[in-house]
Amino acid sequence: MTRAHPFSHVSVPLPPGTRPRPIHLPATASGSERKIVSWNLLRRVGATPRDVIHLIEEETPDLLLMQEATSDFDALPDLIGGYYARAPLPGRIHGVACWSPWPFRRPPLACTLPSGPLVRRVAQMIECAPFTFSVANVHLSHGQIMNRRQLRRIAEILPPHAAVLGDFNLVGPTMMPHFRDVGPRAPTHRMADMVPIRIDRCLVRGLSCTEARVLDNYVSDHRPITVRLELSGYK
């Protein structure tokens, strides 16, 4: 029996016409360092497209990763330019999405992850044209055994130089072989609106992190994180 390929293309097609580059960004990206921002938007009652645009204008990322993004955010290319794709979770109104001022090297792909019976999960695999490494955008399960299984699955798929960012829903060590946790150490979420925990993370393999911060933005129940990543040993 032939097994299905783990990837399926679920990017939202962009409307016809060109996508203007946001005016605050340079015409090209140079070197291997890339700035990435990741944010769980809190579907329907959290961040709006305007909040996301404000974050882009403030932080000027090379890549923005979003979790719990609904169809409302499909308008981002029309509102600010750039390139965008969203991968809804099966049977849900929300999913993982990404935005970049640069064209994607190829359309972002959705990889099906091991999942529990209630919510099926996907990871969004991204390669942007100026990038020299791959990025997985994740919103993992709450089960502390299941989300570690999902990370091991992602590790098997990614190339040697790669990063995994997003909402891990994970407490404690990730147990992801050959990956290092380089994200900011400050809390990013308040469990039950009371207990501060760090569940928005960044793991890397074959990369170095030159900056990691938690951003002061409170329109969602998660605070965004930002990292600067580059190839290890890059000159």
Image: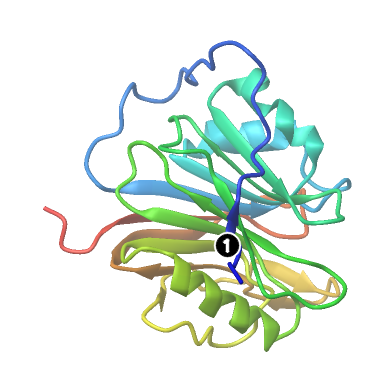
**Residue pictured at 47% horizontal, 82% vertical:** 176
Q: Is residue 124 left or right of residue 232?
A: right
**Residue 227 higher or lower than 195, as above or below:** above
What is the x, y in percent for residue 225?
A: 55, 57
Q: Residue furthest top?
A: 17
**Residue pictured at 54% horizontal, 68% vertical:** 201
What is the x, y in percent for residue 34?
A: 35, 47
**Residue pictured at 80% horizontal, 43% vertical:** 70
Q: Is 128 or 183 nearer to us in this picture? A: 128
Q: Residue furthest left?
A: 235
Specify the color scheme. Answer: rainbow
SS for dot 1: loop
**Residue 49 higher or lower than 10, as above or below:** above
- Is residue 110 among what the camera can see? yes
What is the x, y in percent for residue 166?
A: 59, 61
Q: Is residue 187 left or right of residue 208?
A: right
Q: Amino acid at mark 1?
A: Pro
What is the x, y in percent for residue 202?
A: 49, 66
Q: Quadrant of residue 206?
A: bottom left
The quadrant the N terminus occupies is bottom right
Q: Is residue 81 left or right of residue 196?
A: left
**Residue pictured at 71% horizontal, 60% vertical:** 222
Label 1 crowd bin: few (<14), some (14–19), many (20+), radius 10 Å: few
Q: Residue furthest front?
A: 1
Q: Is residue 159 left or right of residue 186?
A: left
What is the count of numbered marks? 1
- Is residue 227 among what the camera can see? no
Residue of label 1: 6
